[in-house]
């Protein structure tokens, strides 16, 4: 993990010729021993949800039949006692630690307040698998039941599927328990029809207890409340959050919801049928007869930037929800990390293994690509994008003439003090600003008088543009995006305070076209609205999935814009209903539909339910603006069609071992994976290639020439059915399926292979999309899978480590193109060694020089050259370079002493690196720091490589090196390309010690 090692560096640091000196004490961050934070600790051993009886004398707690845990069983109690004894043993090693949470159902471990030094020491404890610092996560902030077809024929409601006796766990900002959508009153068992029936007792499978309301000592407005047969549990988790934060004065130190987010998601997923708002709107949740268990983990702080959800508290809620026996979890919370090694990622894996369906929000960081983080990026839960429904309308710019550009254009009104509502209808000629960006006084004011200014984004604030247009006599302004980046194509909401005219922003392509037709007549009318139905919301996070490019994310889309549902009266002026937008609002739609699926198909696994939603989704959605169709990185498999998901025909199932195999092949493996586990999975026939993970989507992040992936489908339809494969191939890629026809009876499974072959028409390094559909013979029951592949020109090793002053290596290269192939080398550059020693918790300062012309400079530590060479010590690096104040230019802080900082095309001159003792064995720790400077071929190597690449073939690069000095290390970089472009690089590290 990255850590802040040094907080400040004194300007005027000594530029002594001495290459080794002690850093001034006041340059250091506070003593690491005194920084006490919350850390999550994972212990060796399986949690209760997945323990299969591998320890003699302790029976299995995982139920293959009943899926849910049985806390009343003797096996549960005995194994829970065993886990507790392990926790106590580890905690005894850090007596000063204050425990915050204990985990045992979906995760084996605990959270505790401790120093970073103590946390680092735990990493080497024999019973500890992983340690994470607590993170602050964020909430991802009309009748959708009608829009989704739940009130029409056919629909699950009319089949009596309304979530009866299904428990939805909502991990969020709490709950407003008195809300009518959560009242324990008789409601129709068939959703929107039939006689009203009272809720029965809490299902016996749910063993959770607690109803935390009435902490009037903290907030006098926190009234007591007794949970009932609708709201069956409410509990709060705040210990980790409050370790480093305080609560806003309006918050409740209980499960009561102040923010409103949790009440909104809960009532969207499982609110009662037919609740009427003061405005006469009728609201119903997706699963109106489902029960609700609320787990509050998200808190408002005095400073909104400090508000959020502690990952340690969230872990405790996940763990407890699984132990309680919830059927579905809605988790409209997430972070930006793309590494699947977080504690919550792992906890949700065990939750899925326990049979819990989990829906999560994709994130609100769109429209830029690659903005989806975790836990939404992991394959074992369902990530939901936000789409707009039939109640969503947007602002429009109407262009009446000339005919070549006439039409209605998508627009977003700016956020200024004067709105279109204030001015009413405005119709005038569009006059292009001079200058175009309107960042200075307009020179065409005579032409602009009484007209609508058309200007381009960029160069200055929106307020400047507005005011320059107004000063020139414009009655309104139309700004078009500048198209300088992927996320600067579509309109955004402009912030334009201190302005006097209304304004809108339009798309780059629309604006550029209107500029070519200066004088077009434009109309801005507050009454003119354009439907935004079936568009992906602009804020919805997009793929590709950086953490796992072979896993298409998001999975599906659901309504998430202007969603009317329950809320807390605290921040809404006393209102119990309100509209919110975000993928947070989309996720509970899917969670509610999952509750319906759980009632209809109690034997389905979470993967089967997810497959049913994905393979029956519709794909007729558009991007946020313009005519282009949405692609799988916008909407995954598409917008959910609930009625179709109950009879999907075929499903793609996956279990715990499938996901472990995926993790074995992941670049960043979590602590639950070890080499023995991966070897065992391989011996059982599991593929470690993430493209082979049995998902209802197909992704290949690096398609070199030809690749064949495998899938397995299971029939869940009645009787025997025939299916045949239909392919919509990605551009420039040929796709074949074997076998092309499947015949399956209910419960039977079949495997098939899909082969992708890149053609000369493919755009290299660009994603291409398609779909595979299994079409049924007779009754139409299409089973659709989105496809996303990225053809790349070649594939080869990224890093190679070798030894010896002289030697040779062979490097295989697979080609995905035909043409010239060229391989070049930077180096081998022998490193300059700086031996030193650092005291416990201290640091050492080393100066080094980077010569003119250096293309890559690296400073590095190696585990073998630190302490006893075992890798148990943790030294970190912080590098400062020439310039005013000697600025920081790079840091490295991995869990061991394997550290490196690379500087690309660095400024020549003197640099300084702090070697910091983050955690090491007691006493001084010796080390050797290396500095490598690469500026071309040093002449100590000889390369032999093919001169031509051939599509779907492979080649061999031979590298010989000679004459290296003994007792050092040397670095080289091989560049693979076609002479004009570099396609890939291979790092060569030679150890001559």
Image: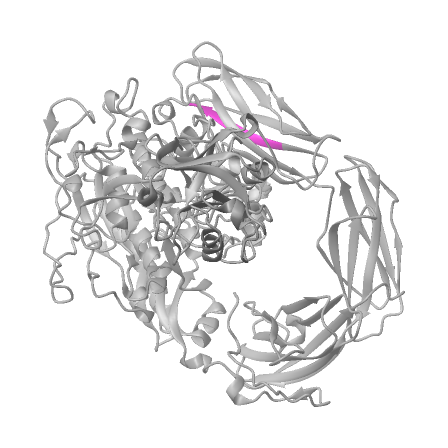
Which is the main secondary structure of the residues drawn in magenta? Answer: strand
Depth check: give the residue in front, 951 or 71. 951
Which quarter of the figure is the C terminus placed in? bottom right
* Residue 77 position within the rendered picture, expressed as x and y whole percent measured from the top left: 26, 53
Residue extent of the magenta highlight: 709-715
85 sits to left or right of 284: right
User: Is 713 a magenta residue?
Assistant: yes
* Residue 396 position within the rendered picture, expressed as x and y whole percent measured from the top left: 42, 36
Occupied quadrant, residue 119: bottom left
User: Is 81 a magenta residue?
Assistant: no
Depth check: give the residue in front, 717 or 252. 252
Task: Check the image and report above or below for 885 versus 619.
Answer: below
Task: Check the image and report above or below for 23 versus 786.
Answer: below
201 sits to left or right of 408: left
Residue farthest toward the front in the current orientation of the protein:
446
Can residue 19 be seen from the camera position used here? yes
* Residue 880 position within the rendered picture, expressed as x and y whole percent measured from the top left: 63, 77
Task: Check the image and report above or below for 60 versus 186.
Answer: below
């Amino acid at each position: 993990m990255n850590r802040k090692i040094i907080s400040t560096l004194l300007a005027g640091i000594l530029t002594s010729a001495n290459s080794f000196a002690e850093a001034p004490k006041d340059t250091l961050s506070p003593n690491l021993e005194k920084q006490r934070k919350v850390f999550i600790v994972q212990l060796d051993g399986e949690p209760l949800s997945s323990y299969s009886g591998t320890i003699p004398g302790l029976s299995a707690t995982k139920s293959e039949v009943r899926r849910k845990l049985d806390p009343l069983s003797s096996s549960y109690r005995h194994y829970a006692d065993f886990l507790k004894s392990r926790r106590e043993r580890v905690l005894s090693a850090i007596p000063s630690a204050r425990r915050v949470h204990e985990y045992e159902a979906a995760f084996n471990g605990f959270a505790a307040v401790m120093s970073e030094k103590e946390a680092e020491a735990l990493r080497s404890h024999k019973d500890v698998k992983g340690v994470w610092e607590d993170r602050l996560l964020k909430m991802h902030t009309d009748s959708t039941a009608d829009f989704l077809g739940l009130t029409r024929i056919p629909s699950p409601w009319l089949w009596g599927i309304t979530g009866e006796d299904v428990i939805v766990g909502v991990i969020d900002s709490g709950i407003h328990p008195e809300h009518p959508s959560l009242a324990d009153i008789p409601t129709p068992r068939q959703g929107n029809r039939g006689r009203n029936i009272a809720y029965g007792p809490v299902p016996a499978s749910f063993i959770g207890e607690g109803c935390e309301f009435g902490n009037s000592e903290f907030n006098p407005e926190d009234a007591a409340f007794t949970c009932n047969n609708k709201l069956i549990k409410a509990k709060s988790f705040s210990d980790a959050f409050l370790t480093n934060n305080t609560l806003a004065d309006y918050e409740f130190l209980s499960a009561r919801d102040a923010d409103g987010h949790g009440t909104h998601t809960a009532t969207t997923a499982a609110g009662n049928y037919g609740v009427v708002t003061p405005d006469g709107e009728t609201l119903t949740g997706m699963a109106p007869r489902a029960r609700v268990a609320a787990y509050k983990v998200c808190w408002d702080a005095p400073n909104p930037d400090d508000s959020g959800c502690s990952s340690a508290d969230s872990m405790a809620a996940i763990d407890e929800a699984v132990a309680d026996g919830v059927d579905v979890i809605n988790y409209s919370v997430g972070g930006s990390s793309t590494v699947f090694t977080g504690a919550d990622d792992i906890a949700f894996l065990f939750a899925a293994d326990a049979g819990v369906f989990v829906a999560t929000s994709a994130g609100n960081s769109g429209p830029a690509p690659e903005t989806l983080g975790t836990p939404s990026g992991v394959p074992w839960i369902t990530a939901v994008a936000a789409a707009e429904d039939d109640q969503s309308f947007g602002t429009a710019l109407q262009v009446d003439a000339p005919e070549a550009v006439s039409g209605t254009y998508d627009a977003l009104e700016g956020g200024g003090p004067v709105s279109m509502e204030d001015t009413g209808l405005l119709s005038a000629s569009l006059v292009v600003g001079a200058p175009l960006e309107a960042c200075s006084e307009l020179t065409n004011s005579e032409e602009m008088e009484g007209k609508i200014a058309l200007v381009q984004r960029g160069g200055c604030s929106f307020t400047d543009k507005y005011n320059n247009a107004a000063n020139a006599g414009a009655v309104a302004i139309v700004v078009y995006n500048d198209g300088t980046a992927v996320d600067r194509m579509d309109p955004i909401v402009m912030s334009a305070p201190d302005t006097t005219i209304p304004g809108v922003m339009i798309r780059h392509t629309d604006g550029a076209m209107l500029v070519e037709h200066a004088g077009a007549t434009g109309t801005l009318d507050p009454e003119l609205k354009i439907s935004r139905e079936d568009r992906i919301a602009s804020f919805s996070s997009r793929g590709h999935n950086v953490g796992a490019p072979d896993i298409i994310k998001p999975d599906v889309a659901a309504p998430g814009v202007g969603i009317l549902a329950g809320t807390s009266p605290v921040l809404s002026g006393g209102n119990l209903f309100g509209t919110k937008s975000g993928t947070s609002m989309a996720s509970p739609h899917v969670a509610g539909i999952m509750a319906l699926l759980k009632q209809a198909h109690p034997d389905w696994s979470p993967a089967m339910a997810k497959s049913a939603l994905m393979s029956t989704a519709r794909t007729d959605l558009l991007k946020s603006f313009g005519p282009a169709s949405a692609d799988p990185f916008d909407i995954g498999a598409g917008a959910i069609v609930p009625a179709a998901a109950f009879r999907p025909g075929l499903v793609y199932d996956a279990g715990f071992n499938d996901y472990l195999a995926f993790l074995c092949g992941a670049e960043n493996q979590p602590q639950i994976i070890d080499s023995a586990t991966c070897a065992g999975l391989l011996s059982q026939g599991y593929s470690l290639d993430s493209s082979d993970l049995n998902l209802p989507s197909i992704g290949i992040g690096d398609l070199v020439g030809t690749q064949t992936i495998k899938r397995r489908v299971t029939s869940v339809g009645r009787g025997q059915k025939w299916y045949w494969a239909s392919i919509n191939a990605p551009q420039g890629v040929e796709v074949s399926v074997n076998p092309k026809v499947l015949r399956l009876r209910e419960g039977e499974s079949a495997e098939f292979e899909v082969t992708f072959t890149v053609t000369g028409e493919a755009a290299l390094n660009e994603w291409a999309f398609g779909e595979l559909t299994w079409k049924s013979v007779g009754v139409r029951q299409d089973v659709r899978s989105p496809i996303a592949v990225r053809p790349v020109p070649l594939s080869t090793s990224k890093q190679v480590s070798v030894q010896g002053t002289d030697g040779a290596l062979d490097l295989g290269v697979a080609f995905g193109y035909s043409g010239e192939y060229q391989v070049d080398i930077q180096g081998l550059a022998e490193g300059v060694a700086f031996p030193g020693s650092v005291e416990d918790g201290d640091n050492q300062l080393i100066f080094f020089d980077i010569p003119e012309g250096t293309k890559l400079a690296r400073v590095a530590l190696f585990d073998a050259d630190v302490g006893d060479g075992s890798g148990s010590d943790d030294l970190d690096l912080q590098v400062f370079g020439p310039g005013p104040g000697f600025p920081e230019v790079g840091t490295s802080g991995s869990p061991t002493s394997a550290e490196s900082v690379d500087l690309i095309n660095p400024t020549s001159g003197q640099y300084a690196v702090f070697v910091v003792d983050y955690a090491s064995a007691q006493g001084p720790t010796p080390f050797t720091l290396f500095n490598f400077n690469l500026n071309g071929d040093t002449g100590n190597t000889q390369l032999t490589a093919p001169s031509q690449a051939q599509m779907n073939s492979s080649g061999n690069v031979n590298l010989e090196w000679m004459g290296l000095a003994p007792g050092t290390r040397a670095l080289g970089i091989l560049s693979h390309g076609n002479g004009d472009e570099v396609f890939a690089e291979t790092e060569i590290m030679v150890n001559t010690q």
